[in-house]
């Protein structure tokens, strides 16, 4: 009979009467030490597996005039002018979450490899392959096609003949597999997204570099970008940056600094089985899973800049479609600068014990301009308590989030919510955070007029110029639990509070309407055939 390792003999349960330290073997503690994970963190994760995460309580959707600001032409012009005068005088940085592989973009292509169907006529008749047929009939329009055809020719194929005969299998294998372009294993940032009239092409990373030049260029012509990566992609990313940056610097007269980080092992979460006991490998070792994009608050917390732009890796367009993006990025930044100045001017007044009249003025401005509620205990507070409350509510990081009119795209949206303390605030809420079994909550969720395109500008410094510790502003009760399969066994995985959801829950939050032209994500390979990507 096979002898199980000591680690797997230990019953993993968090009964209240049992001390957590007795539930682990020495091997387990070594795993935790190597990852930088504390026992308290694991105990908290198990608690969430057992009790689940509470749903968000929606009060109402944020809409134009009630939580979402809409700027007219005059205001846009003012903010654009202020961007040049104010924002470019400070350091700016673009933060791009870009970790995962792009394999989900090619779902239909992988299905084709599992069950190849040759012949364009059959593809057009089979409804299951309509997306694939559209992809194949437009192969020549993709930015990667010329490189793919050249690679196939090198291997002895005849791309034009294969195309005419309807033999598409070599193209799909050449695109996805290791001996070809290996797109099935690369991150989105390294894929060629756009083809230009002169025959050149750009990857998503190169488009982000170009965007950085257009709206993240400070007065000394410095451009800073930071990408988060998976460890296995770091070397290819670095080589791509070495090849791409010099030509851009020479052409546009800038100095581009590109840094990167990986998701920290300390943010990985323990996996458990369906009975909330530790899920283990065959050798008895604990299984951990990435903590989701909410883990990136750690990466963001390590950075320092006067203004930080956040935008997803796949939301980029060619140069001739960039104007709306550049305009509104500058507008969001200038609006943030305006709000930050107001906030940082008010805090010293409150610290010096502002009088009753001034306190009321500040409170009114907070509620009408900053969407900050002071709660229902205001009347019972003394003057010094009122000043202290307003200081606490103002002394926080600030984020301005662009919001796009909802045209059926998936994603979270802007809502007024109430937390466990009865405090009402603006939050970005995903459907998984809402109790859809509650008719009233479901109705509120469906009433949203806008959704979140991940278009954020941040301030992470206090009124004295000191960096905030962003950990202080995370709502730990806004994580997410999902069920996965590993080696034929079911497990439960836990994601940390999302970067723009719970990880920023206690920031000062402002929503601004931005045009749909600023939102052009690439979720499937066929999205690159949309007009905004051509």
Image (cartoon, helix red, strand yellow):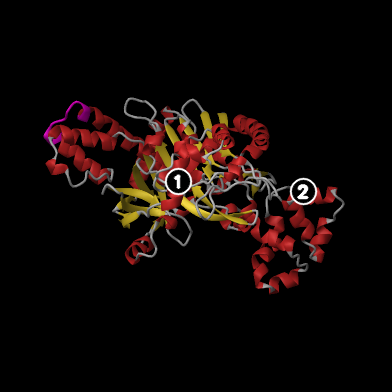
Q: Which residues are magenta?
A: 350-358
Where disc 2 sits, the SS reads loop
Q: Is residue 498 visible?
A: no
Residue visible at 65% across and 53% down in the picture: 487
Residue 498: give its label.
Answer: none
Residue visible at 29% across and 31% down in the picture: 344
Where disc 1 sits, the SS reads loop
Tag 2 or tag 1, which sits nearer the N-term?
A: 1
Residue 307 in percent (x, y) is at: 42, 34
Q: Quadrant of residue 383?
A: top left
Residue visible at 22% across and 43% down in the picture: 374
Residue 14: give its label.
Answer: 1
Left or right of 157 in this view: 508:
left
Residue 304 in percent (x, y) is at: 45, 29
Q: Nearer the viewer, residue 425 or 271?
A: 271
Left or right of 348 in this view: 325:
right
**Residue under label 2:** 180
Q: Nearer the viewer, residue 470 or 406?
A: 470
Label 1 – label 2 distance at C-alpha:
49 Å
């Amino acid at each position: 009979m096979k002898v199980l390792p000591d680690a797997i003999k230990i019953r993993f349960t968090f009964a209240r009467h049992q001390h957590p330290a007795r539930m682990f073997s020495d091997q387990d503690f070594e795993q935790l030490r190597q990852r930088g994970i504390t026992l308290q963190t694991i105990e908290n994760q198990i608690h969430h597996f057992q009790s689940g995460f509470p749903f968000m309580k929606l009060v109402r959707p944020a809409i134009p005039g009630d939580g979402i600001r809409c700027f007219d032409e005059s205001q846009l012009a003012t903010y654009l002018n202020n961007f040049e005068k104010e924002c470019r005088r400070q350091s700016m940085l673009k933060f791009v979450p870009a970790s995962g592989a792009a394999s989900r973009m090619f779902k239909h292509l992988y299905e084709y490899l599992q069950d190849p169907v040759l012949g364009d006529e059959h593809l057009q008749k089979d409804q299951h392959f309509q997306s694939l047929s559209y992809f194949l009939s437009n192969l020549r329009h993709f930015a990667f096609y010329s490189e793919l055809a050249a690679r196939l020719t090198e291997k002895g194929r005849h791309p034009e003949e294969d195309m005419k005969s309807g033999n598409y299998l070599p193209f799909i294998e050449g695109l996805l597999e290791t001996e070809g372009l290996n797109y099935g294993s690369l991150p989105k940032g390294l894929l060629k997204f756009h083809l230009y009239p002169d025959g050149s092409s750009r990857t998503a990373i190169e488009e982000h570099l170009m965007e950085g030049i257009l709206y993240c260029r400070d007065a000394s012509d410095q451009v800073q970008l930071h990408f988060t990566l998976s460890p296995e992609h770091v070397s290819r990313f670095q080589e791509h940056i070495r090849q791409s940056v010099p030509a851009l610097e020479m052409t546009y007269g800038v100095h581009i600094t590109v840094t990167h980080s990986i998701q920290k092992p300390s943010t990985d979460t323990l996996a458990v089985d369906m009975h909330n006991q530790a899920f283990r490998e065959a050798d008895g070792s604990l299984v951990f899973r990435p903590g989701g994009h909410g883990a990136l608050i750690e990466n963001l917390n390590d950075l320092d800049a006067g203004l930080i732009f956040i935008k997803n890796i796949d939301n980029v367009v060619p140069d001739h479609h960039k104007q709306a993006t550049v305009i509104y990025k500058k507008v969001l930044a200038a609006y943030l600068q305006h709000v930050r100045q107001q906030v940082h001017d008010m805090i010293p007044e409150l610290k010096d014990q502002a009088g009753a009249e001034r306190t009321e003025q500040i409170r009114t401005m907070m509620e009408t301009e900053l969407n900050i509620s002071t709660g229902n205990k205001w009347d019972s507070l003394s003057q010094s308590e009122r000043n202290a409350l307003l200081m606490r509510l103002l002394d926080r990081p600030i984020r301005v989030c662009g919001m796009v009119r909802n045209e059926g795209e998936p994603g979270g949206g802007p809502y007024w919510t109430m937390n466990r303390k009865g405090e009402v605030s603006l939050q970005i809420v995903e459907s998984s955070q809402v109790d859809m079994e509650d008719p009233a909550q479901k109705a509120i969720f469906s009433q949203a007029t806008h959704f979140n395109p991940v278009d954020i500008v941040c301030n992470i410094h206090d009124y004295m110029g000191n960096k905030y510790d962003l950990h202080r502003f995370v709502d730990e009760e806004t994580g997410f639990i999902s069920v996965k399969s590993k080696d034929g066994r079911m497990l439960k995985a836990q994601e940390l509070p999302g970067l723009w959801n719970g990880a920023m829950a206690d920031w000062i939050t402002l929503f601004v309407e931005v045009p749909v032209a600023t939102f052009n994500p690439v979720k499937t390979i066929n999205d690159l055939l949309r007009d905004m990507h051509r």
